[in-house]
Amino acid sequence: MGFPSANGSSPAARPFKFLIYGKTGWIGGLLGRICDSQSIPYSYASGRLEDRSSLEADIASAEPTHVFNAAGVTGRPNVDWCESHKAETIRTNVVGTLTLADVCREKGVVMVNYATGCIFEYDDTHPEGSGIGFKEEDTPNFVGSFYSKTKAMVEELLKNYENVCTLRVRMPISSDLSNPRNFITKITRYEKVVNIPNSMTILDELLPISIEMAKRNLTGIWNFTNPGVVSHNEILEMYREYVDPAFTWKNFTLEEQAKVIVAPRSNNELDSTKLSREFPELFSIKESLIRYVFEPNQRTPVA
């Protein structure tokens, strides 16, 4: 689906030039590296999402064909921060994201928005282990955390912007096992972990696909996860097999987890059929984990 630019032509009719929000963030940094590797001209934006005039200045200066929004508030050290900083969370995740989408639309520019799939939880029609995932058109049903609430709010409103490509990222993973934002790094450092199958996003495989989606001017909502699900224990078993044979961990229940976190966490399976149709080469979550994460980090001989 193409989006006509302000001068009536497709954004892809001229050479690609990307403007990226989120320079200091994990995904924003990786996007810059991908653009470097593909020799795509790009720049990082300096404006604040909630400051419309600074966004207008960014776009006027960069004259991008596409804008990538990898900025936002997830909380430090985790989403529990958002529970006690609600105004700040709204300012960036709702007001800021909508302002950027609106400015981009006004300027005739496609915006790729790295959103979240943590707006669903297993329910009676999508039971855990059933293989029945939530589709792009399904209504979010998880309101356990304020972070997820804001993300569901803004996703619903962004449906009205035909220039926006919303990518539902979940539990992002990369080959950089030293990055504290990496889901694998997180769970290897926890004292105890739950063991629930979930849809997840392998950034090494999927971020280049998001670049290609921009080139194709794809818009609308996309479940941006590898096909299938993987559990915490399955990931940690791979970690032990490929990286650290001495690694051990302990499990605990959701009820026990609830005692040590402020806000509940989302657990779900997203249906990635739409993405797989557009990109049939996409690996399943377990295949992608091995190819993009564990084989590059392999320290032990694997039988």
Image (cartoon, rainbow, N blue to C red):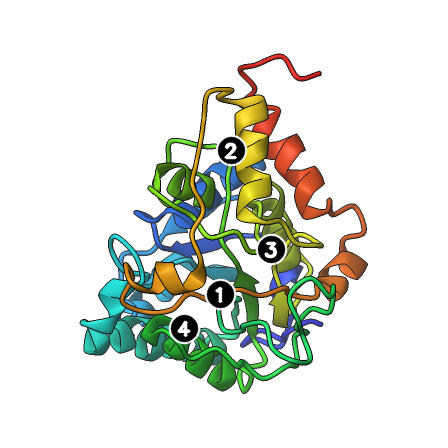
Residue 239 x %, y %: 53, 30
Question: Is the Cβ of the residue at disc 1 closer than 8 Å to that at disc 4?
Answer: yes
Of the numbered discs 4 and 3, the one sitting upstream in the chain is: 4
Point out which mark residue 197 bears. 3
2 or 3: mark nearer the eye:
3
Q: Amino acid at mark 2?
A: Ser
The residue closer to the viewer here, 183 or 50, is 183
Point out which mark residue 175 bears. 2
Regarding mark 1 in the picture, which secondary structure is present there? strand
Of the numbered discs 2 and 1, the one sitting upstream in the chain is: 1
The residue closer to the viewer here, 2 or 123, is 123
Mark 1 to mark 4 CA distance (whole Å): 8 Å
Residue 168 x %, y %: 55, 65
Look at mark 1 in the image and give the residue it sits on: 116
Of the numbered discs 1 and 4, the one sitting upstream in the chain is: 1
Q: Amino acid at mark 3?
A: Pro
Q: Residue at x 55, y 56 (%)?
A: 196
Establish if 131 lies above or below 122: above
